[in-house]
């Protein structure tokens, strides 16, 4: 029995040892597999974190790119792609599908746009060269016209001096000038057509050329008027003549009237009947029209006369304020002061111009305001006292601007003193302090034999509106 029990214990021990060995091997295998699984899980987790980080980075980069392209991160890929293609098609500036397909990405679009810009730069360079050439041609044309103007001015002066010649001599001169007029008008028309064609071809390029064209046409129009005057068979170098004089009442009658659009209050300077050139002659007196009698006769009163050289029948009358059948246009600049009292008489001069049928179209006020506009049909720019370096810069600029415009439109300038002399202006005695036989008391005729007696009680002195006292001079 004991042997069987020992055998049983041995068998049990052997089985126990074998189970122990099997369990140990199994435990080792499971532990090794668990460790490998744990390492693989840790690796998978690290890989997942890496993938997650890369995915987040990719998403951020995608969102940045989408925003850079002008979209929002919420937009889907297909929407962004569709809009990107629409943008490419829009800014590629091409219409055909083949070309749009060629511009498949933004670098290619940038390249194509750069090529377009380069081509446009070359085209602009060519246009600039053409503009510079055109400017040079215009300057040459203006210089040529200026030379023609000077030549015409010289010929006009010669014709004025030759006006006293007999009809036969004038007829010969007129034949000569008719031929000259024909040639000059042909040249002007040809130049005008060339200028218009050139200006029309470049109408959209620059406002500067449009302005220069208008100025040039204005100068051409003025030259044409001068040519027409040269071709006039009976040019008017003076406005009229004195028909008769009544010394007692200081009344004169002249040979101009309603047919010449004459009106009351127009004053004239009087020149000796032998005067050939009133522009440089010294006046002998002054008259003012008080009644327009009929088409060719008017009545006037003597404003200024001389005992030694009285106004006589046949004497010439002239006024820069008046022109037969035409409204004279004037511009004013500087301090308009009739009597050197440093008070502006601009309102009085404007009133006298309007009363004579004229018009003030441009003016530089004492405050430096440039109003109105000079044009080629402006008769004169009347210059008062010029501002000095102490004057308001605004006033100095306005003075320079209106003088530049007068030069540009070939408008002649005349000083205030010369203009007043040429319109027959006579100051009142209280303005001059010289109540002699050349000046009337308050604008009323005074007989020479009795200075205290009024010759004609119907005459009433006219006083111009008072000027302001806040001038800038």
Image (cartoon, grey):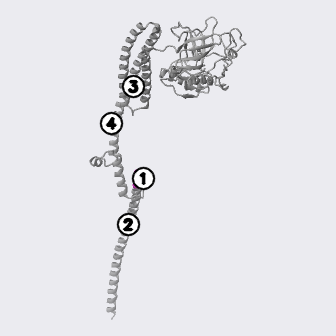
Q: Circles 1 and 2: CB distance less than 8 Å?
A: no
Above or below 244: residue 223:
below
Q: Circles 1 and 4: CB distance less than 8 Å?
A: no
The residue that disc 4 covers is 119
Extreme top residue here? 308
The residue that disc 3 covers is 135
Check the picture and name the quadrant holding the C terminus.
Answer: top right
Instruction: Report helix, strand or loop for mark 4.
Output: helix
Instruction: Give how far across and how far down residue 274 sits, in percent.
Output: 53, 6
Instruction: Report helix, strand or loop for mark 2.
Output: helix
Who's the residue at 64% across and 18% down the image?
338
Tell me the CA gap for discs 4 and 2.
Answer: 66 Å
The residue that disc 2 covers is 39
Tell me the CA gap for discs 1 and 2.
Answer: 41 Å
Instruction: Report helix, strand or loop for mark 1.
Output: helix
Q: In this view of the protein, which residue sits in the foreground, 153 or 292?
A: 292
Sequence-wise, the earlier of marks 3 and 2 is 2
Sequence-wise, the earlier of marks 1 and 2 is 2
Closer to the camera: disc 1 or disc 3?
A: 3
Tell me the CA gap for discs 4 and 3.
Answer: 24 Å
Above or below 188: residue 208:
below
């Amino acid at each position: 029995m004991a042997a069987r029990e020992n055998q049983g214990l041995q068998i049990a021990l052997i089985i126990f040892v074998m189970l122990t060995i099997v369990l140990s091997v199994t435990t080792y295998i499971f532990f090794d597999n668990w460790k490998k699984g744990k390492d693989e899980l840790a690796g998978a987790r690290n890989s997942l974190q890496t993938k997650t980080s890369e995915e987040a980075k990719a998403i951020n980069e995608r969102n940045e790119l989408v925003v850079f392209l002008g979209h929002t991160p919420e937009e889907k890929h297909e929407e962004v792609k569709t809009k990107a293609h629409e943008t490419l098609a829009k800014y590629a500036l091409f219409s055909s599908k083949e070309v749009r397909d060629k511009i498949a990405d933004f670098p290619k679009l940038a390249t194509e746009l750069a090529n377009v810009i380069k081509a446009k730069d070359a085209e602009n360079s060519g246009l600039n060269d053409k503009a510079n050439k055109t400017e040079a041609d215009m300057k040459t044309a203006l210089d040529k016209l200026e030379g023609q103007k000077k030549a015409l001015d010289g010929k006009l002066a010669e014709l004025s001096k030759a006006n006293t010649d007999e009809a036969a001599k004038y007829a010969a001169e007129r034949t000569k000038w008719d031929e000259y007029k024909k040639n000059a008008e042909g040249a002007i028309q040809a130049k005008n057509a060339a200028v218009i064609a050139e200006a029309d071809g470049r109408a959209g390029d620059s406002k500067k050329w449009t302005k220069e064209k208008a100025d040039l046409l204005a100068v051409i129009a003025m030259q044409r008027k001068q040519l027409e005057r040269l071709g006039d068979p009976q040019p008017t170098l003076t406005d009229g003549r004195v028909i008769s004089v009544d010394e007692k009442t200081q009344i004169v009658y002249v040979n101009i009237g309603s047919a010449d659009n004459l009106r009351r209050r127009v004053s004239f300077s009087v020149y000796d009947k032998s005067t050939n050139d009133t522009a440089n002659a010294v006046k002998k007196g002054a008259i003012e029209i008080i009644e327009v009698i009929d088409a060719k006769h008017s009545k006037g009163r003597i404003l200024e006369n001389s005992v030694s050289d009285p106004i006589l029948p046949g004497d010439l009358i002239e006024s820069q304020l008046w022109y037969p059948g035409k409204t004279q246009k004037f511009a004013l600049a500087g301090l308009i002061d009739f009597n050197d009292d440093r008070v502006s008489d601009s309102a009085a001069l404007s009133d006298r111009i309007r009363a004579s049928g004229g018009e003030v179209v441009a003016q530089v006020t004492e405050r430096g305001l440039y109003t109105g506009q000079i044009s080629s049909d402006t008769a004169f720019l009347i210059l008062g006292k010029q501002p000095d370096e102490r004057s308001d810069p605004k006033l100095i600029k306005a003075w320079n601007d209106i003088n530049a415009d007068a030069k540009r439109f070939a408008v002649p300038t005349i000083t205030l003193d010369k203009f007043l002399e040429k319109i027959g202006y006579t100051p009142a005695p209280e303005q001059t302090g010289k109540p002699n036989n050349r000046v009337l008391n308050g604008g009323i005729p005074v007989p020479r034999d009795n200075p205290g007696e009024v010759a004609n009680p119907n005459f009433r002195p006219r006083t111009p509106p008072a000027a302001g006292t806040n001038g800038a001079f």
